[in-house]
Image: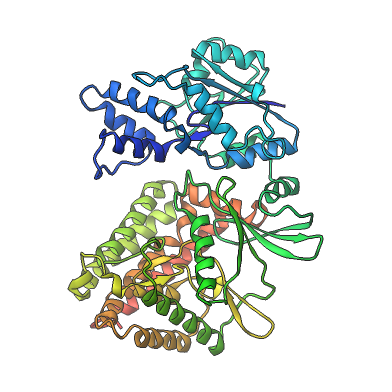
Amino acid sequence: MNIGIDFDNTIAWYDTSFREVALADGFISGNWNGNGKTELRNHLRSQPNGETTWMKLQGRVYGKFMHRAEIMPGVANFFLSCKVRNYRIYIVSHKTEYGHYDPEKISLRQEALKWMTAKRFFEPEYFGINKEDVFFVDTREKKVQKIGLLKCEWFIDDLPEVFKETHFPSYTKKILFGRPNGKKPSYDIIVMDSWNKISNTVLGQIKDDDIISWLKQLIDKPTEKIEKIPGRGNSNVYKITLTNGYSYVLKRYPDQTSDTRPRLETELNTLRLLHQHNIKNVPKAVEGDDDLNLGLYEWINGEKVITPANNDLDQAIDFVKKLYSLSQKIDGNDIDLASEACLSARDLISQIEKRLSRLKLVSKSFPELSTFLESTFESLWAEVKDKSISLWPFESRDNILPKKKQTLSPSDFGFHNSIKLNDGALKFIDFDYFGWDDPVKLTADFIWHPAMNMDSELKQKWQKAMLNLFSNDREFESRLNAAMPLYGLRWAMIVLNEFLPELAQRRKEAGGSKYYNLAKSQKIQLIKAEQYCKSVKKMVSKATFA
């Protein structure tokens, strides 16, 4: 099979470099809060002489600063999988020799080839693309002619104009990479916003040979067995057993074009940090690959904690104590906030309202969801929000909680992310959301998380332990009291993620389609959301929250 692919903004990813260069050259100010190349382009074009400014910036990014570009998420995996299948990749780019308004006359084409060389495109043991299969042309018409001469069965491009060219070959299947703006593309154009989706369409389901080709970049040892681990949230997780008997966890994180959080980097750095500080009841990080979005970790033999006991809770409390102690010892300025950190009442309320807005947008297609939101959730939300704000300590009602009162947190912490060894010891896993947060969120989430199966006695013991641990913060108890019902309603929103198309698709891909029934899952999650609301109603019926 011959597969043709555009280069700029299809293979090479410039979102970060566009912003950096625009800022350095004074085209935008440091407080510009747009996101991505498209928003930046639209912003610059709206300014006086904006088209000229944009063309200047393009020349700089594609030329002198080409080395700052990243490989588009999912492309590396796709290239290696094509190599496994002996498919031929052609790169066909409409790229002029020199950038507009470039006094240095840097060759854009040579810089692109240098970048591809640095990214190992032409190494036989990596992508193995022939340099002779890279073509630069001066016009879209010549690009289309080249696609026809190469007899490409597929062509992937981020510009719909390419597919509209009169002589685009009729036998070539068209994939438009990205999200369509404005008018819907013609019926014969497949629109896809991630390389994972493109791979599934062009290459089919991931095979063991694909995983072996990816794994080779992390650990070059013969593999005996690969097992997909179902039910691991949003990531694809595999147990890798080598012929020498050693086993590892291979984790493929969500595509960063849809989930921009640096989850691989966060998890690798966190596990290394914890081991460095003698916190050993977590897996060892073995290796990671940014381009392939893969992390390799120690495999831990053990069982899930189905019904936690006192000893399990003691270990969880001890782990949080270690994290808090570490928080007090290290500078931590190089550690980001935890995923969806809530450092003020305003943060927490904003997160809930954003989730509510997203669900309301899709609720027209789901009558039961619409009824729940309108009849149950929104009236309760209005009541709880006002009462919680009135009870929240002024210090962090609108302003960020001081750093000295924050703690390092896994963010998604609980027995659902632990493994029990034969001797009863727990190992805690999944640290891709790790970072600084209010310990109130850690405390509340541990109680409210739907995967936690704690009785009331264990919940009380946990809450008492947290009140004691964070007692140096005189407002911790008041903040927790005000926040508890809000976190209950936040979880009512989170469990309804199955109604959001993108998140539901990610769950399906992570768990495996044979384990996932969307309609059934949506019904179950709606029941959970109703139960959360009932629990919150009980809580707010008291004179003050408790």
Q: Nearer the viewer, residue 479 or 485?
A: 479
Q: Residue at x 52, y 11 (%)?
A: 141
Looking at the picture, how far across and down is residue 369, in whole percent? 42, 56
Q: Look at the image and tell me whether residue 182 can be seen.
A: no
Residue 385: where, in percent of width, then height? 25, 67
Residue found 30% across the figure and 83% down from its top: 546
Could you say which is closer to the camera, residue 303 or residue 231? 303
Q: Quadrant of the N terminus?
A: top right
Q: Residue at x 61, y 40 (%)?
A: 76
Task: Kindly give the residue lying farthest to the front in the view shown.
Answer: 104
Q: Is residue 356 above or below residue 46?
A: below
Q: How many marks?
A: 0
Closer-to-camera residue (450/162): 162
Q: Which x, y percent locates residue 362?
A: 41, 47
Q: Is residue 396 visible?
A: yes
Q: In the rendered image of this protein, does residue 228 appear above or below residue 427?
A: above
Describe residue 406's horizontal placement relative to residue 256 as left or right.
left
Coloration of the structure image:
rainbow
| Residue 190 drawn at (x, y percent) | 55, 29
Q: Answer with left or right where residue 9 lies relative to residue 374.
A: right
Is residue 504 or residue 263 the one in the foreground? 263
Question: Residue 319 vs residue 444: left or right?
Answer: right
